[in-house]
Image (cartoon, rainbow, N blue to C red):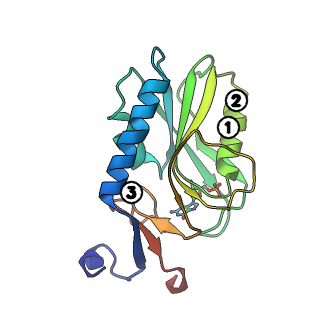
């Protein structure tokens, strides 16, 4: 962790959970699956800001079919490291999604409340299909029935940062995924 002192002056990073190389390989694998599954279609990728911006940008650049990209921004009320389940749409889509094939791109699925809310809200707008592509799933934490079609990694119940994920706005620019030492917060 010494090398990370420059980006982690408070020493909150506990351990590297997923390396840059592992993420790269997984992103290519997911992009290949999506390329095959959506042949002949022009899916609309919806990145959930802010956490998914790094994952989305790497993912779409490996996909070899026509596609479009939009973003939504949501906030959930609650403590810094916990979701309350109450979700507010801060920025909605710029376009109509009726009859579109939607791929919701999220950084992490924890309780599932955020994605459940988004899937329900977007389904009401009559898209042709909606699937979820999430980089991470926290094992055993889901409180609602939600089944992402594309999952990068299943991780233990730790608060993680890096590769788009933040703690208090920090660490999004790290290339690997790290667990934070929550005792130091
Ligand atoms: P959920 O609604 O599934 O409980 O939580 C989803 C959102 O909570 C994620 O999009 C993310 O913003 C935040 N979140 C949940 N777990 C973590 C985590 O371990 N690290 C970070 N940085 N954010 C998390």
- In the image, ligand 1 is in what quadrant? bottom right
45, above or below 107, in the image: above
Say if residue 168 shows up in the picture: no
Depth check: 166 or 17 in front? 17
- Which comes sooner in the sequence, label 3 or label 1? 1
Q: Residues within 10 Å of mark 1 (few under 14, many from 20)?
A: some
Mark 2 highlights which residue? Answer: 123
Q: Quadrant of residue 174?
A: bottom left
Mark 1 highlights which residue? Answer: 119
Give the SS element for disc 1: helix
Say if residue 38 shows up in the picture: yes
Residue lying at 34% horizontally and 76% vertically, measured from the top left:
8
Mark 3 highlights which residue? Answer: 163
Report the side of 28 relative to 77 (left or right).
left
Mark pair 1, 2: CA separation: 6 Å
Residue lying at 26% horizontally and 82% vertically, measured from the top left:
2
Mark pair 3, 1: CA separation: 24 Å
User: Are circles 1 and 2 on residues that touch, CB within 8 Å?
Assistant: yes
27, above or below 84, in the image: above
Residue lying at 74% horizontally and 47% vertically, measured from the top left:
145
Q: Residues within 10 Å of mark 3 (few under 14, many from 20)?
A: many
User: Are circles 2 and 3 on residues that touch, CB within 8 Å?
Assistant: no
Depth check: 86 or 105 in front? 105
Report the side of 69 relative to 9 (left or right).
right
Mark pair 2, 3: CA separation: 28 Å
**Label 2 within 8 A of ligand 1 by Cβ:** no
Residue at the extreme bottom: 184
Give the SS element for disc 3: loop
- Specify the quadrant that holds the N terminus: bottom left
- Which x, y percent locates residue 57? 36, 41
């Amino acid at each position: 962790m010494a090398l990370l002192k420059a980006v982690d002056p408070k020493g909150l990073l506990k351990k590297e959970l997923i390396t840059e190389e592992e993420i790269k390989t997984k992103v290519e694998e997911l992009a290949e699956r999506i390329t095959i599954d959506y042949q002949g279609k022009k899916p609309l990728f919806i990145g959930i800001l802010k956490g998914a911006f790094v994952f989305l940008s790497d993912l779409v650049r490996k996909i070899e079919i026509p596609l479009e990209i939009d973003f939504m921004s949501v906030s959930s009320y609650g403590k810094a490291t916990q979701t309350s389940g109450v979700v507010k749409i801060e920025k909605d889509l710029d376009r109509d999604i009726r009859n579109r094939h939607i791929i919701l791109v999220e950084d992490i699925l924890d309780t599932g409340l955020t994605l459940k809310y988004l899937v329900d809200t977007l389904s009401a707008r009559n898209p042709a299909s909606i699937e979820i592509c999430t980089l991470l799933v926290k094992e055993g934490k889901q409180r609602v029935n939600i089944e992402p079609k594309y999952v990068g990694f299943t991780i233990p119940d730790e608060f993680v940062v890096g590769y788009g994920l933040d703690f208090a706005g920090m660490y999004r620019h790290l290339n690997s995924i790290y667990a934070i030492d929550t005792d130091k917060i």
